Each structure stands twice: as structure tokens, then as C-alpha cells.
Image (spheres, rainbow, N blue to C red):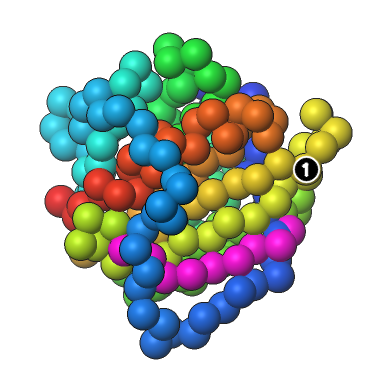
Amino acid sequence: MPVLLAAAALTGCSSEADSGGDAKPERSAAPAAKTAAKGGTVGGPGSGCELPVTFGLAKDWKPKAVAIDPDSDFADLAEQGPVTLACEIDAKPAGQIGFLRVWRTKATTVTPREALKGFVGADENASGAAYKEVEGDGQPLTEVTYTVHSELMDEDRPAHAFALATPEGPVVVHLGGLDSDEHDEMLPAYELAKRSVRVG
């Protein structure tokens, strides 16, 4: 059984900076955002997680497909709003505590923004969500930044996620973290995924 969320910490603020459906995509990352060194690619056959998207994997991060028995006591942890957990990319081998998680929805009529809103809205600890349209590797994305309150750590910490459309329905890539420091240390791995993500 995969290491499913000892701290399923995804929380984000529900106040939105909603730029509307016609907003022009921004470049995926601000100039100050650092990108991790690429150590491989995840999403294709033999990569640890077969997904409808591929993206760059930070050095030493380890992907593992998530398959949960629907009758398991842990089944609810693999569902958040309209999406289901499909892959966990573990940062521990790289020296951090946290995961980059990939979530999928089977509903092809749901837009990436709707998938993100449903994902964040299903987290009762989330607040202050701000959504924007960005661009990865020539790929239009919707990104959300928000705040999660961790009862375990008794602190608010940032969270990031982006979503993109695929023929099989939207895919959400989310970065949490044990605390704010861990989140900030893992952010370059998230930026690498965002800048390099492609469908197929």
C-alpha cells in the first residue's frame, strides 16, 4: 500500500483571484522561481506512474503509482473533490519530507479550472485560493496558490497546484509539504513539473 498521506495536507484559501475564462496565459513561472535539476521524466511507460501527461522529475525524487482498493479504510484519502490520486512522487530520497501528487478525474466535461476549484474546495483547511491561467512547455495550464492550516504543525503553510486538460479528463499536480520550510525547499521540483508538462 502506497505511503498515502500521513499528512494529507492540501489546504487552500477560497478567496479567488479569478481572472475569468478569457484571461491570457502568463508564462509558467516568475523570473525569481527556481527550477530543480531534471533527473528523469514521469508519466510514460516504465516511469513508475503511467499518466496521460509527462513531465520532468527532479533528481532523486521517486514516483510510485497509487492503486487503492475502493473497499479499503484508506479509500477516502485517495479522493478529493472530483479527482482521484494516481501517483505519489516522494521527495524523501532527495532529502525533503513531502510529495508531488498527481490526481486525475474521469469526467472529460470538467475544465482544468473546475477540477482545481473542486479539489481545493474539498479541503476544509484550505483558504485564500488565487487562480490564474499560465503556460508550461507550450501547454495552457490553470494554477492555484493557497494556504493550508496544518493542525499537526499548528501553522499555516502555502500550497501550489496546477491542472491541464487531457483527452482522458483534467490532471491536477499538487505540492504540499510537512511545513512551510519543506514546501519552499520542494517548490523547484514543482516548477520543473509545471514548466515541462505535456499531454501524452
Describe residue 77's horizontal placement relative to residue 52 as left or right: right
Residue at 36% x, 31% y is 36
* Disc 1: which residue: 156
Describe residue 85's horizontal placement relative to residue 106 as left or right: right
Describe residue 15's horizontal placement relative to residue 61 as left or right: right
Describe residue 29's horizontal placement relative to residue 16 as left or right: left
Residue 71 showing in the rendered view: no
Residue 128 showing in the rendered view: yes
Q: Residues within 10 Å of mark 1 (few under 14, many from 20)?
A: some
Residue 164 spot, x, y in % from top left: 33, 61
Q: Main secondary structure of the magenta part?
A: strand
Residue at 80% x, 29% y is 153
Secondary structure under the numbered disc 1 in the rendered image = strand
Residue 81 spot, x, y in % from top left: 57, 58
Q: Is residue 98 above or below residue 54?
A: above
Residue at 59% x, 34% y is 183
Residue 22 spot, x, y in % from top left: 39, 87
Quarter of the figure with residue 190: top left
Q: Is residue 173 above or below residue 20?
A: above
Q: Is residue 183 above or below residue 200?
A: above
Residue at 45% x, 46% y is 33
- Number of residue marks: 1
Q: Is residue 152 above or below residue 187?
A: above
- Residue 157: in magenta span: no
Instruction: Look at label 1 and name its amino acid.
Output: Asp
The residue furthest front is: 31
Front in this rendered view, residue 163 or 192: 192
Residue 77 spot, x, y in % from top left: 59, 38
- Residue 134: in magenta span: yes
Q: Which residues are magenta?
A: 127-135
